[in-house]
Image (spheres, rainbow, N blue to C red):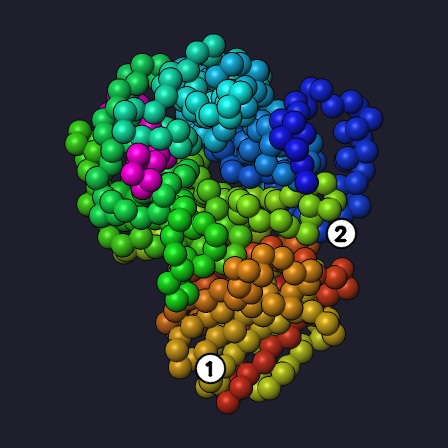
């Protein structure tokens, strides 16, 4: 167990020898990822400050560098010109001021006057461990130098709200800056507050955004608002929802509502039902950004709070998802892998075949790969795919034709964890046409039917688990398969 004192040690107080030993321990982990953003040491959580600035993609993330626990948070910075090769740029924000003495918490970024303005939550606690959140500003120039403003721009939550007041997401529209901030009302219900500003320094509360969910969990974290095609999309991560059949099965959820454009004068949003962004086990706190081509890209934390992961024993925890292009289609948010990921492809294999019973196509195997399975025809009652398999382990995708339900089963994926929340995740998808699967050393991301649904999960298999096979029950399936190793 980590003591409070250990959790709130500063990176600057650690010796070079201590950090070198921790880095060496991390590198002994068999589950370090090949193509995902991951921490050099310690714990990664929320993606922050996603931005396309000065010709580069910038991603910051919550980071406790000294171990695989939630402790004193920094913003670690990585950048890229192509979304696949990420350069470590070091800590961008550190807890150096009184108002962020106990952590530089989540936030966002926006370009202004040729600089990248970072808006984040400062976390301060007193001796009684009472929390004092505030919203703060820092500025990064083209050389990557970051200067923090000495005082918060929003010093605390408004009356009627608790100290759960964090995660500002900022944007500009019609000459004004707006920010949505996650909050908790004094009656212990979650919500999002809308603020506006002329200059990013002086902020005015517009109001508590009126939605169709006045009592939907006890806290809404990491809100994000954007518009496409005249529609408004509010993304948020509600805490405290109870599981309902196949929905809301994780400890905390992430999802969205789509509706009319946000009424920014009255803080009102007319919208449809809340939908989960990801149907898997390990997805939380997503954030979006616009790039130079006008694409909206989404990256999430491939993990969850308050859960121990098998990598903890190696001194590190968590990674980020691959970048996903998101678009509004009807009443859904469609997610597809960013096209740049195709540059990672090596050793292409294409094949067509009929599957009846358990079938293994000899050219198909791998531990780090992308695979597209197109179902040309399906007469079977049950169709399944086994990944990262050996004689002892496998991760399964199972489709039941009668119920139109797709299930991700990690009950035998490898080292077990978080089993109190179940080992299967399912959703109704209609007819199964295509599975596009990205597998890394310790994760799987499944894009179903062109991104209509996505399943994300951490898995921790043996290193020799590289078999791929297919199976049917009560009939057969005709498949076209494309597979690449990813390097």
SS at mark 2 in the image: loop
263 vs 158: above or below: below
Inspect the magenta stretch and tell me whether residue 179 lies in it. Answer: yes
Q: Nearer the viewer, residue 196 or 226?
A: 196
The residue carrying pointer 2 sits among few (fewer than 14), some (14 to 19) or many (20 or more) residues within 10 Å by Cα, namely: some
Residue 178 seen in the figure? no
Q: Nearer the viewer, residue 165 or 389?
A: 165
Please provide the residue range marked out in magenta: 174-189
**Predominant secondary structure in magenta?**
strand
Picture quadrant where residue 187 is located: top left
| Residue position marked by numbered label 2 in the rendering | 30
Q: Farthest residue toward the left?
A: 266
In the rendered view, does 229 fall on the left or right side of 48? left
Is residue 250 covered in magenta? no
**Residue pointed to by mark 1:** 378
Q: Nearer the viewer, mark 2 or mark 1?
A: 2
- Residue 400: image location, x then y, percent: 45, 78
**Image: 284 above or below 13:** below
Q: Is residue 2 visible?
A: yes
Pointers 2 and 1 in contact (C-beta within 8 Å): no
Circle 1 — which element?
strand
């Amino acid at each position: 167990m980590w003591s409070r004192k250990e959790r709130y040690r500063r990176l600057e107080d650690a010796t070079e020898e201590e950090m070198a030993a921790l880095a060496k321990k991390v590198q002994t982990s068999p589950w370090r990822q090949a193509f995902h953003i991951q921490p050099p040491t310690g714990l990664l959580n929320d993606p922050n400050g996603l931005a396309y600035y000065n010709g580069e993609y910038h991603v910051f993330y919550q980071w406790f560098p000294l171990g695989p626990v939630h402790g004193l948070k920094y913003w670690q910075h990585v950048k890229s010109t192509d979304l696949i090769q990420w350069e470590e740029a070091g800590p961008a924000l550190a807890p150096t001021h009184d108002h962020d003495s106990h952590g530089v918490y989540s936030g966002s970024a926006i370009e202004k006057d040729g600089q990248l303005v970072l808006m984040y939550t400062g976390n301060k606690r007193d001796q009684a461990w009472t929390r004092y959140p505030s919203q703060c500003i820092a500025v990064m120039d083209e050389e990557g130098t970051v200067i923090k403003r000495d005082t918060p721009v929003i010093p605390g939550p408004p009356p009627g709200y608790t100290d759960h007041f964090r995660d500002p997401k900022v944007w500009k529209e019609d000459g004004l800056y707006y920010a949505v901030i996650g909050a908790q009302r004094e009656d212990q219900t979650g919500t999002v507050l809308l603020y506006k500003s002329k200059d990013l320094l002086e902020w005015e509360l517009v109001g508590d955004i009126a939605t169709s969910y006045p009592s939907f969990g006890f806290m809404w974290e990491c809100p994000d608002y954007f518009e496409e095609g005249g529609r408004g999309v509010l993304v948020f991560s509600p805490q405290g929802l109870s599981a309902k059949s196949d929905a809301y099965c994780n400890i905390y959820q992430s999802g969205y509502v789509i509706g009319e454009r946000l009424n920014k004068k009255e803080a009102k949003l007319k919208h449809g039902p809340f939908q989960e962004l990801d149907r898997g086990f390990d997805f939380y706190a997503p954030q979006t950004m616009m790039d130079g081509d006008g694409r909206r890209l989404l990256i999430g934390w491939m993990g969850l709070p308050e859960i121990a992961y098998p990598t903890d024993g190696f001194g590190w925890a968590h990674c980020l998802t691959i970048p996903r292009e998101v678009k509004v289609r009807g009443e859904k948010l469609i997610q597809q892998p960013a096209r740049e990921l195709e540059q990672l492809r090596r050793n292409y294999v294409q094949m067509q075949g009929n599957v009846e019973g358990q079938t293994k196509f000899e050219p198909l195997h791998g531990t780090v790969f992308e695979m597209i399975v197109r179902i040309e025809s399906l007469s079977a009652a049950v169709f399944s795919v086994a990944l990262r398999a050996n004689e002892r382990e496998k991760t399964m995708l199972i489709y039941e034709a009668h119920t139109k339900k797709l299930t991700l089963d990690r009950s035998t994926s490898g080292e077990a964890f978080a089993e109190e929340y179940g080992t299967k995740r399912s959703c109704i998808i209609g007819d199964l046409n295509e599975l596009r699967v990205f597998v890394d050393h310790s994760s799987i991301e499944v894009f179903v039917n062109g991104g209509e649904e996505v399943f994300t999960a951490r898995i921790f298999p043996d290193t020799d688990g590289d078999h791929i096979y297919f199976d049917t029950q009560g009939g057969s399936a005709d498949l076209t398969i494309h597979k690449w190793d990813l390097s």
